[in-house]
């Protein structure tokens, strides 16, 4: 009696699998089958996802007031450029070294930061200090003899 009951349960379970395979509960059926469609001639004229030439971008963030420190530390995969500077007032954020170019073996970076949305107090030199770092690979450093960081009031250069 026990065997007959188990066989009936097994038979009912197996027959239920066929219905689930064709139902919307099966994740393999969620997108349906593919169909052939006519190609859109406009698609061929669209721009590629990767730009062919670099697009000029003017960074709206102002330069920090001055660069006070510039250090290049070696890492296992290249170098870490670390710069410290002073801003005009408290509240500057989104600090970044943006690449400006390459001039005769010198990498040039601009030290930029976004000002606070609301006017801030001038603050003390300790509260106006910002630090930023940028990782450079050995490939980025190939042929580079110096790194220059430019601020509004000065620039600092470090060389090999």
Image (spheres, rainbow, N blue to C red):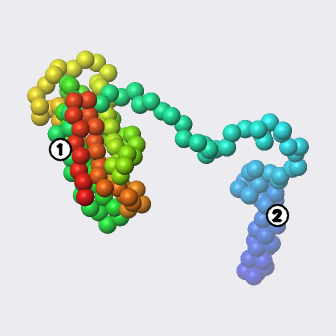
The local crowd at label 2, few if under 14, some if 14 to 19, many if 20 or more residues have their Cα within 10 Å, is few
Q: Nearer the viewer, mark 1 or mark 2?
A: 1
Tag on residue 77? Answer: none
| Quadrant in the picture for the C terminus | bottom left
**In this rendering, position of residue 119 left or right of residue 105:** left
Tell me, yes or no, if residue 24 can be seen here: no
91 to 146, vertically: above or below: above
Tag on residue 18? Answer: 2
Q: Position of residue 48 (x, y in %)?
A: 67, 43
| Quadrant in the picture for the N terminus | bottom right
SS for callout 1: strand
Q: Earlier in the sequence, mark 1 or mark 2?
A: 2
Q: Residue at x 35, y 55 (%)?
A: 144
**In this rendering, position of residue 2 left or right of residue 142:** right
**In this rendering, position of residue 31 left or right of residue 93:** right
Q: Residue at x 32, y 66 (%)?
A: 76
Q: Residue at x 41, y 31 (%)?
A: 59
Tell me, yes or no, if residue 109 can be seen here: yes
**Residue placed under numbered mark 1 in the picture:** 69
Q: Position of residue 67 (x, y in %)?
A: 21, 38
Choose between 129 and 151: the one closer to the eye. Answer: 151
The local crowd at label 1, few if under 14, some if 14 to 19, many if 20 or more residues have their Cα within 10 Å, is some
């Amino acid at each position: 009696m026990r065997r007959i009951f188990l066989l009936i349960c097994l038979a009912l379970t197996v027959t239920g699998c066929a219905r689930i395979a064709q139902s919307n509960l099966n994740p393999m059926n969620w997108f349906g089958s593919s169909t052939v469609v006519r190609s859109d001639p406009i698609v061929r004229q669209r721009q590629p996802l990767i730009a062919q030439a670099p697009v000029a971008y003017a960074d709206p963030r102002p330069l920090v007031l001055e660069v006070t420190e510039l250090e290049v530390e070696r890492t296992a995969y290249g170098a870490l450029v670390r710069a410290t500077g002073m801003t005009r007032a408290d509240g500057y954020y989104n600090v970044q070294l943006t690449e400006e170019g390459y001039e005769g073996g010198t990498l040039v970076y601009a030290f930029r930061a976004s000002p606070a949305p609301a006017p801030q107090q001038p603050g003390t030199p300790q509260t106006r200090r910002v630090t930023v770092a940028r990782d450079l690979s050995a490939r980025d450093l190939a042929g580079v003899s110096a790194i220059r960081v430019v601020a509004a009031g000065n620039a600092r250069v470090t060389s090999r």
